[in-house]
Structure formats: C-alpha cells, structure tokens
Image (spheres, rainbow, N blue to C red):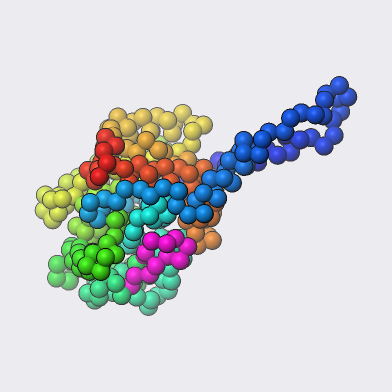
Amino acid sequence: MNEDPPAPTEMVYPLTSTEPDVSRETEPLPDDETPIAAAAATAARIRGGRTDTWPRPVSTRVLTVANQKGGVGKTTTTVNIAAALALHGLRVLVIDLDPQGNASTALAVPHHAGEPSVYEVLIEGEPLATALHEVEAVPGLACVPATIDLAGAEIELVSLVARESRLQRALSALLQESTETGQAFDFVFIDCPPSLGLLTINAFVAASEVLIPIQCEYYALEGLGQLIRNVELIQSHLNPDLAVSTILLTMYDGRTRLAAQVADEVRSHFDDLVLATAIPRSVRVSEAPSYSQTVLTYDPGSSGALSYLEAAREMAHRAATGGGGATT
Ligand SMILES: Nc1ncnc2c1ncn2[C@@H]1O[C@H](COP(=O)(O)OP(=O)(O)O)[C@@H](O)[C@H]1O
Ligand SMILES: [Mg+2]
C-alpha cells in the first residue's frame, strides 16, 4: 500500500553519533523549510479561512459525477471537490444519489432510514429544500442526503410519471428559489450509484456537465465507451445540454509505470477534458470518511487534500464546457 511519506524528523537530528569526527553543529533547517512545517503552513492557511476567492460561474454549474464502475472515486471526488470550492467562497450543493449514502456520511449529514432525503424528493415529489442540510464543518456547503430507502427507488421510479426528469424538476425549483432569495448556488454535484439505471439517468437529465473520475488501473478504460454512449443517448433524447466536461484521474500511483500509461492513454483520448491535476493514492483520503470528514478538514496539509484543492481550482477557472483553462 502506498502511504504519505513519514515525517523525517529523527533522521535530521540524531541524538548520538558513533563517528567522533562528525560535527554536531549541523545547521538546523529553518522552520518553514521542513516538510512538516510546509504542510502545517498549508493546513493553517486552509483552516484559517480563505486566502483567495475563486471566480463564481455566471450561472449555476450542475455536474453529475458518474462512472458505472464502483470504487473509482466518485464519492471521494464529489465531497472533496465540493468542499474545496466552498472553502474558497463558492456556494455548493451535493446531492447524494447513491443508496449507500457515502457522500452523506463523509459530510456528516444525518441519513438514517426515514430521515427526509432525496428519496422523498424523487418518489413523493417533496421539494429538495425539505431535505437540505448545511454541512457544519464547511461553510457554504449544503447536502441533500440519501438513505437506504433509495435502494428501492430504481424500481419504484419505473411506474411514475416523468420518471427520468423528477430530479431535474426538483432541482430547477430549488435553484430558482435560492436565486430569488440571494443565495444562488454556484455548483451542484450529484453523486451517482455505480450503475446506469434510472437514478443515474435522473442525474444526467438534471445536469449539464458530466464529471468522470477514472481510477488509474488496468481496466480503467473498460466500460468508458458505454458510459459515453449513454451520455450521448441522454443528449439526443432527454437533455440536449448534457456534455462530458471534466475527467479526473484518481488513485494515481506515481511509482508504477501502469498508472502513467493509463494516464497517457486517457489524456490522448480525452485531451483537455482531463484535469492537469491527478489525485494520488493517499491513506489520508481513505481515512477521512470514517471520521465523517472530507480530507480537506481531516488533514488539510496531506497530499490528497492539496491535490483535490488544486483539481477544484482548475475546475473553478475553467469554462463550463471544459478545456483550455478559459475562465467563466
Ligand atoms: N486518492 C485516494 N487514495 C486512497 N484511497 C482512495 C482514494 N480515493 C478513493 N479512495 C478509497 O477508495 C474507495 C472507493 O472510493 P469511492 O469514492 O467510494 O468510490 P465510488 O464512489 O466510485 O464507489 C473508498 O474506500 C475510498 O476511501
Ligand atoms: Mg460512491
């Protein structure tokens, strides 16, 4: 397993020396130049508030985070990119559309069975606002949770009117309402389950952008064709505005040649849709959800937090259609 590098403190100042000729008066490194100090300084900057505010998009950007493979980093990407944008002054909403409720867990939003959630919105036509929670640890970030009730929604949706556009209707109403009250959302992220069923279709119809996390491993590109074809089908039948705008390489292991090959291949296929920042494999990223946190609050100076921050910065500065680094 790959871990963040251990702190090198013991190596720098040995307490005893077995070599009598070696001077003990080695100059210590200045405080701000040790790796620990640099990480601490970054952490302090992130915790201490916004150092810079990123540009707001002209209108709300709604992104569906999709990949029918499980375990590629959809949820991790959703919560961490959303938190990074909120920490830089943007108003952000996460809609958890996976019955497992992992995004709700990472954002510490209550999601026991029976709690108002996206299930009631989709099946009973409740407004999204009734299930919306502010995320305590991250000002500016809100979340609509998923409970286990959502597991039955794929089947229950089949017989409902306008079954593909129920989320889209609810989201349009919420966005209009929040704009009217001066609380407009800048970004909405919809975290999808690992399938291309009716829940994911609802997300595609509600969004104008698709963000695809790709795990840098051997089978990474398998199934991607099917995903893209589905996006095209939705585009031609249900939502002409939909496009894949962003691809993010996740769990990148810089020590393996395979990861570099996968990254090269993805970049050659998708060109500048792929963010320049790849997210490294980092234990801090995988630990954060068990403390009901994003990695940005759990360990702000870690490589995972810094990479998600950088990836979010790229997204904020890109045009909604992706590519080219154009500002919105
Ligand atoms: N950069 C990373 N480094 C280490 N572990 C990661 C990283 N990104 C995700 N993980 C872990 O991989 C697993 C799958 O990630 P997750 O975001 O839940 O995928 P998905 O939502 O696509 O199923 C989780 O246990 C998560 O903590
Ligand atoms: Mg997930």
Quick check: 97 above or below 1?
below
Q: Is residue 154 left or right of residue 312?
A: left
First to last magenta residue range:
131-143
Image-quadrant location for residue 143: bottom left
Quick check: 310 above or below 197?
above
Classify the position of the C terminus by image quarter: top left
Residue 266 x/y as whole percent: 33, 34
Residue 46 x/y as whole percent: 50, 51
Residue closest to the eye, 256 or 116: 116
- The residue furthest right is 20
Q: Is residue 142 left or right of residue 172?
A: right
Which residue is at 24% across, 56% downward? 60
Image-quadrant location for residue 201: bottom left
Residue 198 in sight: no
Which residue is at 53% across, 45% downward? 42
Residue closest to the eye, 290 or 60: 60
Which residue is at 32% across, 32% downward? 267
Residue closest to the eye, 308 or 159: 308
* Magenta-colored stretch includes residue 138: yes
Quick check: 263 above or below 305?
above
Q: Is residue 46 left or right of residue 29?
A: left
